Image (tube, helix red, strand yellow):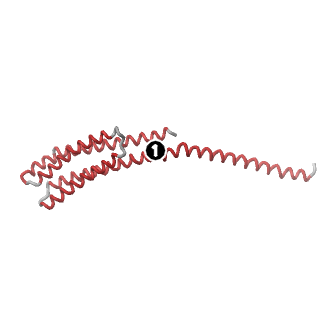
Amino acid sequence: MRLGTKILGLVLLPIAGIIVIVSYGAMQLNAGATGTEALYSKQFLPLVNRDMPRIQALSNGIQSLQIAMVHAYRVQSAERQALITTSEEESAAVEQTHAREIAALHAAVDKAAAAFSDEQKKSIESFATKAADWEKNSRKVLDYAKNPEKLTYARKISQGSASKTFDETLAALGVLAGELNASIDKAIASAENSK
């Protein structure tokens, strides 16, 4: 062999090796991209398009129920404030607060209801019944508190039946939040199983 051929062989052999390594790397990158695209379209997109909006709606429902609980406490606060009002102006302001907070409580529960399944909506009906009993007792406290002769009865109702039905109403809100929380757990488990 001639010297030129040997040099040419020494130069071409590493170049051929580099071409083989680069070709193999390109094939691996292409296979990885295809696998990543399949992972993205089969697992990630369904999670984002189907599961995440449902989980977010359920989470928003829980948040609305927490807001409803805040309004329930404000209603109870207005009821207790009615027991110590001394003027008609204060009494009127307390009544406005009471009515506004009851309306806000129901608006928050109605907003949360959008996240409930048809089966779970039965629990909302149970809440509505308990809330109606509580509102009736709370309203009675406000009415009796206006009359100094009935103030003792107003206090007894506030500490008795109104307090009991308030606790039942809060428990019903807790049940509603628990059902939404269980739905979130199911949605997450479903997302995990669909991988």
Picture coordinates of residue 83, whole percent (x, y):
14, 54
Q: Quadrant of residue 92?
A: bottom left
Picture coordinates of residue 53, whole percent (x, y):
44, 47
Q: In the depicted view, which residue is nearer to us: 125 or 61? A: 125
Left or right side of 129 for 37: right
Picture coordinates of residue 14, whole percent (x, y):
80, 50
Of all residues, the one furthest to the left in this rendering is 149
Q: Residue at x 34, y 42 (%)?
A: 178
Q: Residue at x 30, y 39 (%)?
A: 122
Q: Count all numbered tags in the image, as a single digit.
A: 1
Q: Which residue is mark 1?
A: 51
Q: In the depicted view, which residue is nearer to us: 27 or 84? A: 27
For mark 1, give the secondary structure.
Answer: helix
- Name which residue type carries label 1: Asp
Q: Residue at x 23, y 55 (%)?
A: 100
Q: In the depicted view, which residue is nearer to us: 2 or 109? A: 109
Picture coordinates of residue 7, whole percent (x, y):
87, 53
Left or right side of 6 for 123: left
